[in-house]
Image: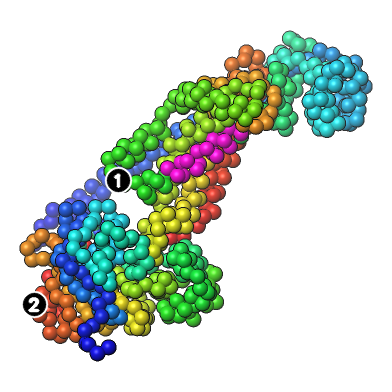
């Protein structure tokens, strides 16, 4: 392509997210680029998870929650009336903070999502592909029929990633995917993200500044608004390099250099 | 600053001793509560067992020597059959043979028949197990004095024959087979009715219902229904199942003619209604125990709510649901009041053969026997209570086994 305009995977417009009357996240306008890793960082309670879960309508399960504004996927507002949240989650997969494989076999963990979404191809191939994609194949190829609960925490988390890529989403959301893991497993997941971004757009929430710096191309810095409303917002969003070397906002600088609070 | 607001050294130890005294006092109270509970359980069991075993003094109306030279327990099956055939009137023998071919009856059943029809046992008096053991000499003297012709025997009223014989007007020959089968039919129908409905309602309340005002009222009402006295359910069963839906519960809708609404089906449905709130509550607990992370995992790969419930929530909650339901139903098996209202038969010797049969149940049988004046009926009532308790324990043990079998997976 000739024009240098980056391709946008998903974009928010004037997004507010409420729990009841409390606006946990307000006025977020960001454009997430395709096949890049975007990190969301910020202090605890500033609404990172809330924002992330809004992208695949996981917040729908909190009865009091609702959003205003728009989240656009290929120009379609995910929150417009005619959009089915199941379809949204089919296109935007999620990996959770705590590994949560199904209490089934390793094989079934991958095949179940494919089955319910009407996958017609060769299931064995899909399982192998997904496990390879999550850098887990070599460790589990001989025990596919064993329970997923026999895997270590790090392996379980990679299984959850494999489960997500098996349904071939466009975007993968990850909420602190390595926070429950040891440094070696963390490293593997980080390497994995570098590979995955060849095919997927990744949005990751992390508390680990080094991790954000290592894995992400873009970073969104979130912070509670100054006015005391306890509402979080994105105060700065740009290339990760910039956020860490030459941030525009003083608060960002304080936070990434550890002088926050 | 050296000054502290906390007690130090000696005064600390004094206050510590005070804390221990209070702790010991409470521990003692809890322990005595446990002792009282255990004692009352032991007393209950002892009371039951005490009645089911003991001395019995009986006479034969017709001396065995009038029929056979050999003692009864040395006769073989062929000789027993011969004995009955020659001494019973041919009409009576034919009737017995029609009920169940004589050749197919077991030896112990034939012995019972000989005792009942030919020798005609007449029980004079029975004694409890405690009396029999502690005052055995007094009892022997009393019997020798009062009933010189009587035979004194230490017997267990709980025998295999007791379990397999139907009701009889004579305590010596009465059994609980009809009642056991009635109870099992009733519980089976109750489970078939209440388990699917209860599970369905629990799934709806846990997985679908909003936490709004109306649903909170429904939830509160279910909790309250679980505490409604069982007789009220009996009235409900009488009004609805026995009367309003008589066409269905009597089976006349399906061409069964000789029945009214007082069938085992009505009783089963009434018991089902009785345990329904308990089953719903237990199932809700089991469903609540399935962690949310599992639901999120399913939703996260694009599952609908139904797929999440059917493939993940329900399979993982099922052992808990079954355990809870078995425990709920074991309450139904001991219930008496609703059955009296719904109309269990107090004297019936025909096994229930289907949902539209008349029936009796163990608690009804026990209740009926305990109201009789003769002491031998109290003995068989005690035996029937033991049968009921064993049935209950079996159900509860199944529930516990089921719960322990499923390893916690998450
Ligand atoms: N289910 C909920 N109901 C009501 N309020 C909620 C709910 N979940 C989160 N919140 C509130 O929304 C705000 C943002 O929470 P969120 O979990 O998004 O923060 P976070 O940035 O992910 O924090 P952390 O880094 O600790 O995970 C908090 O004030 C929190 O109390
Ligand atoms: Mg969070």
Label 1, secondary structure: give it: loop
Percent from the top left, x then y, of residue A91?
35, 69
The residue sitting at the bottom extreme is: A2
Label 2 marks a residue whose chain is: A
User: Residue A42, relative to residue B405: is it above or below?
Assistant: below
The magenta-colored residue range is: B185-201
Specify whether A42 is left or right of B308.
left
Classify 10 Å Cα crowding around label 1: few (below 14), some (14-19), many (20 and above): few
Classify 10 Å Cα crowding around label 2: few (below 14), some (14-19), many (20 and above): few
| Depth order, front residue of B141/A99 | A99
Percent from the top left, x then y, of residue B86?
92, 19
Specify whether residue B316 is painted magenta: no
**Which label was assigned to residue A250?**
2
Specify whether A171 is left or right of B322.
left
The answer as to whether the residues below labels 1 and 2 share one chain is no
User: Residue B44, relative to residue A173: is it above or below?
Assistant: above
**For the stretch drawn in magenta, what is the main secondary structure?**
helix
> Which residue, given by chain and number where applicable, does mark 1 sit on?
B211
Label 2, secondary structure: give it: helix
Label 1 – label 2 distance at C-alpha: 44 Å
User: Would residue B328 be visible to someone looking at this image?
Assistant: yes
């Amino acid at each position: 392509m000739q024009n240098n305009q980056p391709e946008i995977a998903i974009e928010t417009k004037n997004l507010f997210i409420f729990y009841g009357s409390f606006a946990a996240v307000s006025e977020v306008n960001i454009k997430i680029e395709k096949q890049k890793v975007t990190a969301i960082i910020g202090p605890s309670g500033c609404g990172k998870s809330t924002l992330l879960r809004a992208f695949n309508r996981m917040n729908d399960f909190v009865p009091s929650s609702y959003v205003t504004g728009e989240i656009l996927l290929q120009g379609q507002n995910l929150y417009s009336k005619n959009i089915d949240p199941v379809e949204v989650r089919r296109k935007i997969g999620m990996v959770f903070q705590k590994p949560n494989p199904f209490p089934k076999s390793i094989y079934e963990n991958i095949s179940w999502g494919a089955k319910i979404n009407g996958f017609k191809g060769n299931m064995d191939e899909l399982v192998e592909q997904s496990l390879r994609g999550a850098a887990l194949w070599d460790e589990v190829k001989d025990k596919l029929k064993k329970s997923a609960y026999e895997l270590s925490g790090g392996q379980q988390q990679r299984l959850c990633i494999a489960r997500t890529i098996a349904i071939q989403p466009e975007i993968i959301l990850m909420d602190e995917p390595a926070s429950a893991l040891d440094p070696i497993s963390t490293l593997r997941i980080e390497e994995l993200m570098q590979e995955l971004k060849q095919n997927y757009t990744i949005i990751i929430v992390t508390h680990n500044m080094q991790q954000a710096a290592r894995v992400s191309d873009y970073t969104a810095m979130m912070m509670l608004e100054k006015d005391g409303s306890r509402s979080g917002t994105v105060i700065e969003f740009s290339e990760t390099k910039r956020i860490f070397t030459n941030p525009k906002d003083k608060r960002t600088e304080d936070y990434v250099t550890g002088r926050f609070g | 600053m050296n000054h502290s607001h906390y007690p130090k050294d000696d005064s600390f130890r004094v206050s510590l001793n005070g804390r221990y005294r209070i702790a010991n006092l409470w521990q003692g109270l809890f322990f005595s509560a446990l002792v009282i509970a255990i004692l009352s359980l032991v007393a209950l069991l002892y009371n039951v067992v005490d009645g089911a075993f003991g001395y019995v003094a009986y006479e034969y109306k017709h001396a065995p020597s009038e029929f056979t030279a050999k003692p009864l327990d040395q006769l073989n099956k062929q000789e027993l059959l011969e004995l009955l055939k020659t001494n019973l009137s041919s009409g009576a023998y034919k009737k017995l043979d029609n009920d169940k071919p004589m050749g197919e009856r077991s030896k112990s059943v034939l012995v019972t028949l000989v005792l009942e029809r030919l020798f005609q046992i007449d029980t004079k008096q029975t004694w409890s197990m405690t009396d029999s053991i502690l005052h055995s000499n007094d009892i022997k003297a009393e019997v020798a004095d009062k009933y010189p012709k009587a035979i004194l025997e230490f017997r267990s009223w709980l025998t295999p024959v007791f379990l397999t014989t139907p009701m009889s007007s004579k305590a010596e020959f009465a059994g609980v087979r009809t009642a056991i089968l009635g109870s099992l039919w009733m519980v089976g129908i109750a489970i078939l009715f209440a388990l699917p409905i209860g599970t369905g309602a629990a799934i709806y309340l846990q997985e679908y219902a909003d936490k709004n005002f109306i649903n909170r009222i429904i939830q509160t009402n279910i909790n309250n229904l679980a505490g409604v006295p069982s007789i009220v359910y009996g009235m409900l069963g009488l009004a609805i199942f026995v009367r309003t839906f008589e066409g269905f519960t009597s089976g006349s809708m399906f061409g069964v003619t000789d029945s009214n609404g007082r069938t085992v089906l009505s009783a089963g449905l009434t018991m089902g209604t009785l345990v329904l709130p308990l089953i719903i509550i237990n199932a809700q607990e089991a469903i609540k125990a399935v962690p949310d992370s599992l639901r999120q995992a399913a939703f996260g790969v694009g599952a609908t709510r139904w797929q999440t419930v059917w493939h993940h929530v329900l399979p993982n909650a099922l052992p808990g649901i079954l355990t809870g339901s078995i425990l709920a139903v074991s309450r139904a098996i001991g219930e008496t009041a609703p059955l009296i209202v719904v109309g269990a038969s107090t004297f019936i010797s025909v096994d229930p053969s289907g949902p539209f049969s008349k029936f009796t149940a163990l608690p009804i049988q026990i209740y009926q026997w305990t109201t009789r004046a003769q002491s031998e009926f109290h003995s068989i009532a005690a035996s029937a209570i033991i049968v009921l308790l064993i049935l209950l324990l079996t159900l509860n043990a199944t529930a516990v086994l089921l719960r322990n079998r499923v390893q916690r997976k998450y």
